[in-house]
Image (cartoon, grey):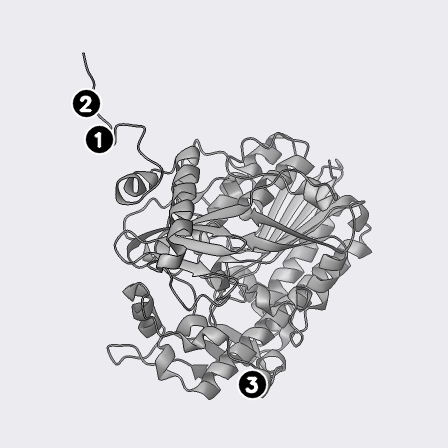
Amino acid sequence: MTDNILFLMTDQHSISTLGCYGNPVVATPALDRLAAGGTRFTHAFTPTAICTPARASLLTGAAPFRHKLLANYERNVGYLEDLSEEQFTFAEALREQDWRLGLIGKWHGGVRRSAADYGFEGPELPGWHNPIDHPDYLAYLAEHELPPYRISDRVRGVLPNGGAGNLMAARLHQPVEATFEHYLATRTIEMLERFAADEGGRRFFLATHFFGPHLPYILPDEYFDRYDPADVELPPSVHETFDGKPPVQRNYSAHWAFDTLDEETSRKLIAVYWGYVSLVDHEIGRILDALDRLGLAGRTSVMMTADHGEFTGAHRLHDKGPAMYDEIYRIPALLRIPGAPRQQARDEFVTLMDFTATILDLAGLPTGDAADGTSLRPLAEGETPQWPDSVLAEFHGHHFPYPQRMLRTGTHKLVVNPESVNELYDLRADPHELVNRIDDPQLAGLRRELMTELHRQLRDRGDNFYHWMTSMFEVGGTDYDVTLSSFESNP
């Protein structure tokens, strides 16, 4: 068990931007320090690259198909907008054990039930972006005599209909102390101080969910200009042609207006994204410093991860969407447990739901209620338990329904797109996933093997997507009545 848990979460955060994951340019000293003090997971994946379903999976320990919260409410096209009242959540499990719960920052977990309904203390901050008009943020600015929000130098492309594209970046005319990120860190530190002074000595779970480095990248001068675009190397997959790929990917590229931006602008966007990562890291450093100052570090487990990644020009895309590339499905994942080995790198496939199980494990609670998660504690403590050699992911749509399932191994990736062409990538020969080899006769045997394994795993977990695969692909034969009826039964 652990006395307390500090959970740090970022939004739309590419692992390629962290020093501890190999970036030689971007300054992330706080996260690098956290990684050095514990375990860095090299193959961590989100169960789905969209905010609300991923965050619901963290809260519940269940894959999206199971908890059924499948879309962000802002562009929901008919899915549920809140978790079922009966759905297990780690928050309610901790609350039943008299833990104090705090959440500062992004919730994005439903419209009818807020974080407070699950027992979290903290200001309610709904939505997908920094709510810069929120009363508590405005009160913070007034209290510290800080200037109001104002931006210039907007960066946007041109939409297919000729209109102005989504805002992608802008210069913020406020000091760092006035940024929403600094506000979130300040409120976190204040809550940390209150929790540390709890007269009952209750254990606490405190989460800080930054809204960044999600688009749009809106930063003060110090971070907007921190990195020289000339030092930016465009991702190799910027040469994506979409040949042999699902047409929706080309459509999404047009939606994000990538081809209407010149190379200089693309480099600047990545440079500003890097600046955003460094700003968030700076604020995380303030929180970790406060943990040390309050004497809590030796009895507080610290976790850091993200809900999903970000394209920033990879595959001629921005944001995320119906394309199951590693840029948006791989996520940073760090875990520091007091007394556990330091400077570990673990290569096992892990997911957000494993963090849920880990929270329960560290709290001394059964982990089985995190239906699709396994505690990371043994890995962080240097053990070598049996572990899956692949990972599943799913997608259900954004703007429009679009079902996908993915099986990712250490060497290959299979993506099933029922309305379109399927995808198969050889990650050894093609790490940037540019060549779809689904119809390559040289990989026919492997394709059947991966299809069969994906089908098996989906069926074992109860994801009914497997029914489509049963009839459409070679998956090892049929051992059940695919009509789901009694028509074929004999009296």
Task: Tell me the residue that label 2 is attached to.
Answer: 488
Q: Nearer the viewer, mark 3 or mark 1?
A: 1
Does the residue at mark 1 contact the one at mark 2 (Cβ under 8 Å)? yes
Q: In the visual, does 170 lie left or right of 303?
A: left
Q: Secondary structure at mark 2?
A: loop
- Estimate the x, y position of residue 13 in percent, counting from the top left: 54, 63
| Mark 3–mark 1 CB contact (< 8 Å) | no
In this view, the mark in front (3 or 2): 2
- Disc 1 on helix, strand or loop? loop
Q: Nearer the viewer, residue 288 or 452?
A: 452
In the picture shown, does residue 211 fall above or below 59? below
Horizontal and vertical percent position of residue 141: 59, 69
Tell me the quarter of the picture where residue 468 sits: top left
Q: Secondary structure at mark 3?
A: helix
Give neighbour class at mark 1: few <14, some 14-19, many 20+ (Cα, 10 Å): few
Q: Position of residue 70 (x, y in %)?
A: 38, 48
Distance from the alpha carbon under mark 1 to that under mark 2: 9 Å
Decide: is 101 above or below 420: above
Name the residue at the front extreme: 442
Q: Which residue is mark 1?
A: 483
Residue 439 seen in the current view: yes
Rendered residue at 49%/44% (across/down): 57
The amino acid beneath tag 1 is Thr
Where residue 235 appears, x then y in whole percent?
A: 50, 75
Which residue position is annotated with label 3? 229
